[in-house]
């Protein structure tokens, strides 16, 4: 292993330690981004805009890459509840964005949490929702309205 590989592994490891979940947080949804994303906090309103395709770039211009679970999974159900949409409405919403040229594609729908986490690790600009109990090293958990999962008042439960 060369020095560059060791440095990358160290940065990835340290980013994963930035959030150490408590037992109370295990059932909360964490908002995860690529470890290279400088963002540390978003408002609940900004999060909604990110996941419904209204906000398509991060500060600095990096494109947002939405990674969602495929239909029928608990993370997908939680996302639809958060957006107050049915599965049909969600599909129609994204189809309309693509047809109008407001989005290149629908969000990438991963069939497993492992694929979600791998995609977030690999893609600069990636963002997803993951239950805290399913978190693995290599992704960065960001705050929502200044709060991490498990904190009193955290809204993604």
Image (spheres, rainbow, N blue to C red):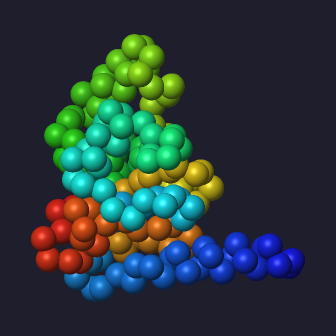
Whether residue 147 is visible, yes or no, is yes
Between 73 and 57, the one lying in front of the other is 57
Whether residue 74 is visible, yes or no, is no
- The x, y position of residue 70, in whole percent, is 42, 44
Q: How many marks?
A: 0
- Residue furthest out toward the left: 153
- The x, y position of residue 150, in whole percent, is 23, 77
At a point 48% along the width and 82% down the height, the residue shown is: 17
Q: Is residue 51 above or below residue 43?
A: above
Q: Is residue 89 above or below residue 123?
A: above
Between 114 and 94, the one lying in front of the other is 94
- The x, y position of residue 93, in whole percent, is 30, 25
Q: Is residue 115 above or below residue 151?
A: above
At a point 37% along the width and 74% down the height, the residue shown is: 133
Q: Is residue 75 above or below residue 89?
A: below
Q: Is the N terminus in the top left, top right, bottom left or bottom right quadrant? A: bottom right
């Amino acid at each position: 292993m060369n020095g560059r590989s060791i440095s990358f592994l160290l940065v990835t490891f340290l980013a994963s330690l930035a959030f150490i979940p408590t037992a109370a947080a295990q059932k909360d949804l964490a908002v995860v981004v690529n470890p290279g994303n400088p963002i540390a906090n978003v408002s609940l309103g900004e999060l909604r805009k990110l996941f419904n395709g209204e906000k398509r770039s991060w500060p600095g211009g990096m494109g947002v890459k939405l990674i969602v679970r495929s239909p029928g999974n608990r993370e997908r159900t939680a996302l639809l509840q958060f957006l107050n949409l049915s599965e049909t409405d969600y599909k129609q919403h994204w189809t309309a964005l693509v047809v109008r040229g407001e989005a290149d594609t629908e969000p990438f729908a991963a069939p497993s949490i492992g694929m979600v986490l791998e995609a977030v690790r690999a893609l600069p600009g990636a963002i997803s929702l993951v239950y805290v109990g399913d978190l693995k090293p290599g992704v960065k958990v960001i705050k929502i309205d200044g709060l991490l999962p498990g904190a009193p008042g955290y809204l993604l439960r």
